[in-house]
Image (cartoon, grey):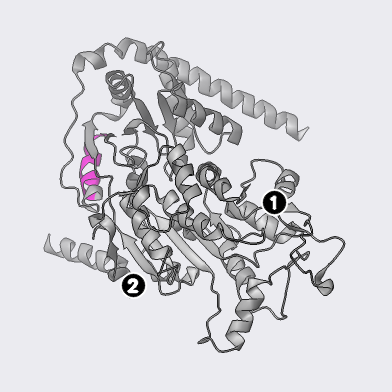
Amino acid sequence: MEEEEAREQKKIARKKVAVLPWMRSLVDVGSLNKCPLTHLPFLHPRLEAALCSSGIDSLFPVQVAVWQETIGPASFARDICVNSPTGSWKTLAYALPIVQILSTRAVKCLQALVVLPTRDLALQVRDVFATIAPAVGLSVGLAVGQSSIADEISMLIGRPKPEADICYDPAEHHSTELQSAVDILVATPRRLMDHINNTKGFTLEHLRFLVVDETDRLLKEAYQSWLPTVLQCTSSSIEGPFAYANNPIPSTFGSLKAIRRIGVERGFKSKPYPRLVKMVLSATLTQDPSKLAQLDLHHPLFLTTGQIRYQLPEHLESFKLICEPKMKPLYLVALLQSLQGEKCIVFTSSVESTHRLCTLLKFFGDLGIKIKEYSGHQHQTVRSKTLRAFREGGIQVVVSSDAMTRGMDVEGVRNVINYDKPPYIKTYIHRVGRTARAGNSGRCFTLLHEDEVKGFKKLLKKADIDSCPAHIVPSDSIESFRSIYASALEKLKESVEMEAFKKRKIGFKSKR
């Protein structure tokens, strides 16, 4: 027994990675209080009005902390890293200071880039920017592949309009000049790379801010080497005073990339100036030095809410339901019936499981609950329609794969149900983060069979959760659905066979 424990300790030791010094010197924002907008220093009056019209009259602690480090005397002296629980409104934490700083811009060009791992999350972040940016005359663009590449180009790139007060350098003027039509771009990595490589007039040379949201996921996947490409496009290493991309844009105030290169040549401690400011955010920010090194952070400041790495929403209640695997659908239906009238998200382990479970639930007949499926294999328009209906209350239950775990904000989600046990603590953190958001209360129910209880307990320990009480579903509630369950399983089997037949038929036709 002692030998087994020793081997286990050695495995844990091998997995441990040395934490970077700046991550040890963290700033705990948990002690801060909410701040009314009227007390927020330097806030533009138009931005205050835009926020108030959206129902926001104060900022949460993480938003206050980021504001203090980016506006005023600090003014982005350091790159910002935020590790904060889901639902703490990290999006507005970076959107507000960026819009505030860019509100004084003289010429329209792409100065802020926000990169996110999924379309749905990018759409949500774009909407946050769109709430405040127009108030100070800024334009927000979206590049996620939702529309055709031609439509995106027409939205992102335009021809310049001569301005009376600006002198154009004849050497830089071309009859076919193009310029950015947006000040802020929200993008997914693949679509961003499409524009960098192929869109004439698209350039990152004037970029001042780079935001990497859901950092751990974006660093985990290569996405066509988007990060090294972006850093190279904004660096000072390319020759020439004004080195442009595929097609030049009118440089009314000079390329920041060129200015950075000149700054290095003039001896600013071998550092480009003005530098590209970076903000990285996640509820589960990686501590792996090799991954963080990819970001090339400048004297980073680590903002977090407490000393615990994996943090849950403050007002979350967690419960477990123990049952036999074959009884899980019955327990789920009984649980949903008891939660009727409350918004719920049911998470499964895969796209296939999501589809099968949602289909099975519909075969239970009239449960009095509107249920829809949400997964990464669905078309974007279908997912957007489902989310809209869920937000508006037309749907009470969404059965989802982990496509919905990252950052998706749906107001009023009271319950999260883990139909399949999350494999990692990060997965659990992001799933439960769909409820108990922005200071509201919420509950999480995890369905387990006896063999999974021990592993689930170990998983929760990583987030310093010592107890997860059992939730008892009345046996009469389960028995009332038992007869329908057998019929529903038969219908599911027929449905799966029919879908498989249709797929084979389509595949046969495509080969002809």
The answer to whether residue 252 is visible is: yes
The answer to whether residue 356 is visible is: no
What kind of residue is marked 1?
Leu
Discs 1, 2 touching: Cβ within 8 Å = no
Q: Quadrant of residue 54?
A: top left
* Viewer-side residue, 411 vs 51: 51
**Label 1 to label 2: alpha-carbon separation:** 37 Å
* Viewer-side residue, 1 vs 365: 365
Above or below residue 75? Residue 407 is above
Compared across the picture, whether 441 is left or right of 235 comes to left
The residue segment tinted magenta is: 446-458
The residue carrying mark 1 is: 156
- Could you tell me residue 99's position as x and y percent? 52, 55
Q: Quadrant of residue 368?
A: top left
The earlier-in-sequence mark between 1 and 2 is 2
Q: SS for tag 2? A: helix
Q: Quadrant of residue 173?
A: bottom right
The residue carrying mark 2 is: 22
Residue at image position (31%, 24%) is 332
Residue at image position (35%, 15%) is 485
Residue lying furthest right:
175
- Could you tell me residue 396's position as x and y percent? 40, 23
